[in-house]
């Protein structure tokens, strides 16, 4: 990943990391403000898998204290672009 991540790239990375938890159409329709865990019915293991996918795709270290910043697609994008 480049040193800086654009908002569009971060959004794409987040949606790609959610692949497997929802269909492509559901992910495309998911708004930036919908809560990911509730909307996609992610349990704790699903969420951990999502976090691992984000870390692998971006190289950004995501600690448990950061999980609150990963509540929505919009908050994930904010977190990832600020962390670069």
Image (cartoon, helix red, strand yellow):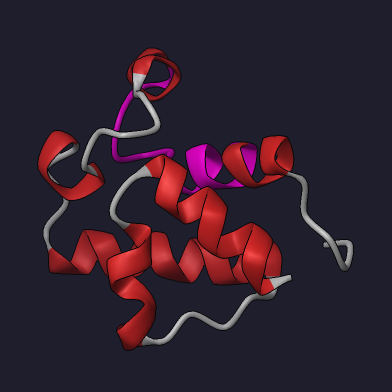
Q: Which residues are magenta?
A: 12-24
Can residue 18 be seen here? The reply is no
Q: Is residue 42 above or below residue 27?
A: below
| Residue drawn 57% across the image and 83% down it | 61
Quadrant placement of the C terminus: bottom right
| Residue drawn 46% across the image and 54% down it | 76
Quadrant placement of the N terminus: bottom right
Could you tell me residue 75's position as x and y percent? 42, 52
Question: Which residue reaches farthest right?
Answer: 2
| Residue drawn 64% across the image and 66% down it | 82
Residue 8 location, quadrant: top right
Could you tell me residue 74's position as x and y percent? 44, 42
> Is residue 8 magenta-colored?
no
Residue 33 location, quadrant: top left
Towards the viewer: 61 or 52: 61
Figure disc tally = 0
Q: Is residue 24 above or below residue 52?
A: above
> Is residue 20 magenta-colored?
yes
- Taking 71 as reference, is 45 left or right? left
């Amino acid at each position: 990943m480049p040193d800086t991540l654009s908002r569009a790239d971060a959004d794409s990375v987040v949606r790609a990391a959610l692949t497997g938890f929802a269909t492509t159409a559901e992910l495309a329709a998911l708004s930036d403000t919908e809560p990911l865990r509730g909307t996609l019915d992610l349990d704790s293991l699903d969420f951990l898998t999502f976090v691992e996918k984000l870390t692998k795709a971006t190289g950004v270290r995501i600690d448990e204290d950061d999980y609150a910043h990963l509540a929505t697609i919009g908050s994930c994008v904010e977190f990832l672009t600020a962390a670069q």
